Structure formats: structure tokens, C-alpha cells
């Protein structure tokens, strides 16, 4: 069993660290928020006085932070404090360019590093069923895999540094687009007199099929996992979808890629977020479309 340094014990990092403890690892954790530290202590994490102290004896250093600036800001301290050959794994969702910069900073300091963002949300973090999308070298991936397997149901090696973040934002850009398209189809169906059930039964087995239809349909009482069954409580909240769409937009602009629908999806989610949607699941954008269809 390994010593694992875990920085960022929030909604995702807290339960992920708890699963590592349950699997028998010695987890040294740190967060800036006292409530996160209390919950982590209750889950069996050994709380350190600082991020640097949490990683000092660690064989694996896992970060689960809000954004790239947090990761890059902390890496300077962590790389100075870690013991030789510690493997750095950043599971935050951040810009591809920031992920590559973090990997370079680690390499310059003599440490192997992976970007390993996740999908699956807080439920997946608690259940240990996250999907990890991993960027970095083959040997480093193989070394990290047993640790990631504890927190995840699927662990996919996507390529070299930054490839995990690239896969994550491409997937989530498509998710944002398909959700808006699915909502538009259901609202149009309503206006044309179709029941949700009839349209769902067709789209779920026809060429309009996607995860946004079959698993997460934005209307109540057609699929069990849908937040529509519980007043659109998240789930995957609108600000997190907006964050990922903005990361995709940044990457598209930086690489001169024409992603018109991805950009439009970001603007629709921004407007919804600013007009009462920020506390809701991202599938609640169907209500905004209904409102504008009156
Ligand atoms: P969160 O805000 O709940 O947790 C982040 C934690 O990092 C906070 O507790 C914060 O105090 C801590 N932190 C910030 N700066 C720090 C520092 N310098 N030292 C120590 N701790 C510090 O966010 P979250 O929902 O856990 O998300 C974490 C990451 O996972 C984000 O990048 C997010 O985009 C991604 N993500 C979230 C979800 C989700 O459903 N919540 C799903 C997939 C991916």
C-alpha cells in the first residue's frame, strides 16, 4: 500500500480520497477549507498542515482543484517538496495548455506527471465509478492505473501530456451540444402534440439517439437517472458545463478550429446561468428553451 498526497478535498476530491483510504492506502490530504478537512479526517485521511507537508512522503501526488491557475500555482510548491520519483496526477479539469505546462514543470523538476481528468460527477466519485481520461507516458500510466482503478470504473489512456484534458473537453463539448439539441427536439415535440414518452421511445432507438436521450433525457418519467425526475437538482450543474464549454472554446480558438455549435452552446449556457439556471442541472436548459418558445 502506498502513501498518497491528495490536495483539494472538495466535492470530488473528498470522496475520491476516502475511497483510497478504504482500499488501504495511507492518504495525506490538504485543503484550504476547514469543513473539507473535517470531512476528510472523518473518512480516515491524515490531514497535513500544508500542501507541501501532505506530499513530502508520497509516492503519488493527486490534485483535484478548481482550475489551471490553482494547479500551476500549487505545482511550484509541490514539486519542491515531493520525494524523488513521486508520480504527479492532476485530476482537475483545466485547459489543455495548462495541463501541458504542468507536465513540463514536473519534467523540468525531474518528476513524472499525468493529466487525468474525470467524468462521472460527485456520484461517481463517491461510488468509485469515475471515468479517468489520462494523458502522459506509457510507463507512468501503468504505474498510476492501480490507484486510478480504485476511484474509477474506466481508466482510458488517451495519449501524451494534455491528451486526457483534450478528450475530456471534446467529450463535454459534444455533451453540451447534444443536450441542447435534445431539449430543442422535446420542446418542438411538445408544440407538435407529441407525448414525451412517444418521442423518447422513437429517439432512443433511432438516429437521434445519444446519452442525452437514453440516459439523461431532460423530461420527467422516461429514464430513472434523469434530473428532470427531481426538479433538475444536479447532477452536473450548469456552471460546470459552462466551464467545460469555455475550455473547449479556448482550445478551439488556440488551435484555429471551427466549432460553431460548441461556441453557441457555451453562449446559451452562459445566458441560462446568468438568468436563474446556475443552481440547476445542465439538462434544465429545456426550461429556458420552453420559456423562449412561448
Ligand atoms: P470543489 O470546489 O468542491 O473542490 C476544489 C477544492 O480545492 C476546494 O475544496 C478548495 O478549497 C480546494 N483548493 C483550492 N485551492 C487550493 C489550494 N491552494 N490548496 C489546497 N486546496 C485548494 O470542486 P469539485 O467539484 O471537487 O471539482 C474539482 C475539479 O473536478 C474541478 O476542476 C472540476 O471542474 C472537476 N470536475 C468536477 C465535477 C463535479 O461534478 N463536481 C465533475 C467532473 C470534474
Image (cartoon, rainbow, N blue to C red):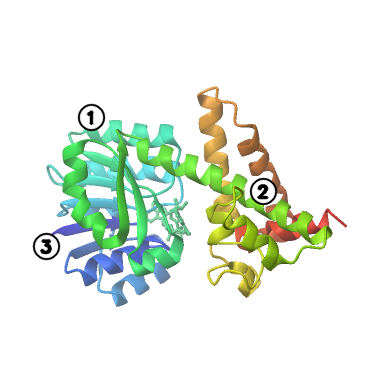
- Give the CA separation, mark 1 to mark 3: 28 Å
- Give the CA separation, mark 3 to mark 2: 47 Å
In the shown orientation, is residue 86 left or right of residue 262? left
> Mark 3 near ligand 1 (CB under 8 Å)?
no
Q: Quadrant of ligand 1?
A: bottom left
The one nearer the camera, 165 or 46, is 165
> Mark 2 near ligand 1 (CB under 8 Å)?
no
Q: Mark 3 falls on what kind of element?
A: loop
Q: Which residue is mark 2?
A: 181
Q: Residues within 10 Å of mark 1 (few under 14, many from 20)?
A: few
Quadrant location of residue 226?
A: bottom right
Q: Which residue is mark 3?
A: 1
Q: Tell me residue 163's x, y (percent).
A: 36, 36
Q: Quadrant of the N terminus?
A: bottom left
Q: Mark 2 falls on what kind of element?
A: helix
Q: Quadrant of the C terminus?
A: bottom right
* First-in-chain label (2 vs 1): 1
Q: From this viewpoint, which residue is outermost toward the bottom?
A: 42
Asked whether the viewer can see residue 54, the reply is no
What's the residue at 30%, 61% (across, down)?
A: 151
Amino acid at each position: 500500500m502506498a502513501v498518497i498526497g491528495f490536495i483539494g478535498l472538495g466535492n470530488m476530491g473528498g470522496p475520491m480520497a476516502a475511497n483510497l483510504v478504504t482500499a488501504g492506502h495511507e492518504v495525506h490530504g490538504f485543503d484550504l477549507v476547514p469543513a473539507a478537512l473535517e470531512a476528510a479526517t472523518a473518512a480516515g485521511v491524515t490531514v497535513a498542515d500544508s500542501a507541501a507537508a501532505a506530499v513530502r512522503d508520497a509516492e503519488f501526488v493527486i490534485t483535484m482543484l478548481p482550475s489551471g491557475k490553482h494547479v500551476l500555482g500549487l505545482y511550484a510548491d509541490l514539486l519542491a517538496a515531493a520525494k524523488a520519483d513521486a508520480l504527479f496526477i492532476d485530476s482537475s479539469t483545466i485547459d489543455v495548455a495548462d495541463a501541458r505546462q504542468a507536465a513540463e514543470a514536473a519534467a523540468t523538476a525531474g518528476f513524472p506527471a499525468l493529466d487525468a481528468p474525470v467524468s462521472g460527477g460527485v456520484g461517481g466519485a463517491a461510488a468509485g465509478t469515475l471515468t479517468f481520461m489520462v494523458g502522459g507516458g506509457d510507463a507512468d500510466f501503468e504505474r498510476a492505473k492501480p490507484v486510478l482503478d480504485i476511484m474509477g470504473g474506466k481508466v482510458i489512456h488517451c495519449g501524451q501530456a494534455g491528451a486526457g484534458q483534450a478528450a475530456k473537453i471534446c467529450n463535454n463539448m459534444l455533451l453540451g451540444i447534444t443536450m441542447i439539441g435534445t431539449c430543442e427536439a422535446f420542446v418542438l415535440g411538445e408544440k407538435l402534440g407529441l407525448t414525451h414518452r412517444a418521442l423518447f421511445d422513437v429517439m432512443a432507438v433511432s438516429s437521434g439517439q445519444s446519452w442525452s436521450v437514453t440516459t439523461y433525457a431532460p423530461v420527467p418519467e422516461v429514464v430513472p437517472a434523469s434530473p428532470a425526475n427531481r426538479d433538475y437538482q444536479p447532477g452536473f450543474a450548469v456552471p460546470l458545463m459552462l466551464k467545460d464549454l469555455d475550455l473547449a472554446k479556448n482550445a478551439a480558438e488556440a488551435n484555429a478550429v471551427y466549432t460553431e455549435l460548441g461556441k453557441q452552446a457555451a453562449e446559451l449556457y452562459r445566458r441560462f446561468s446568468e438568468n436563474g439556471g446556475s443552481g440547476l442541472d445542465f439538462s434544465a436548459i429545456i426550461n429556458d428553451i420552453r420559456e423562449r418558445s412561448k
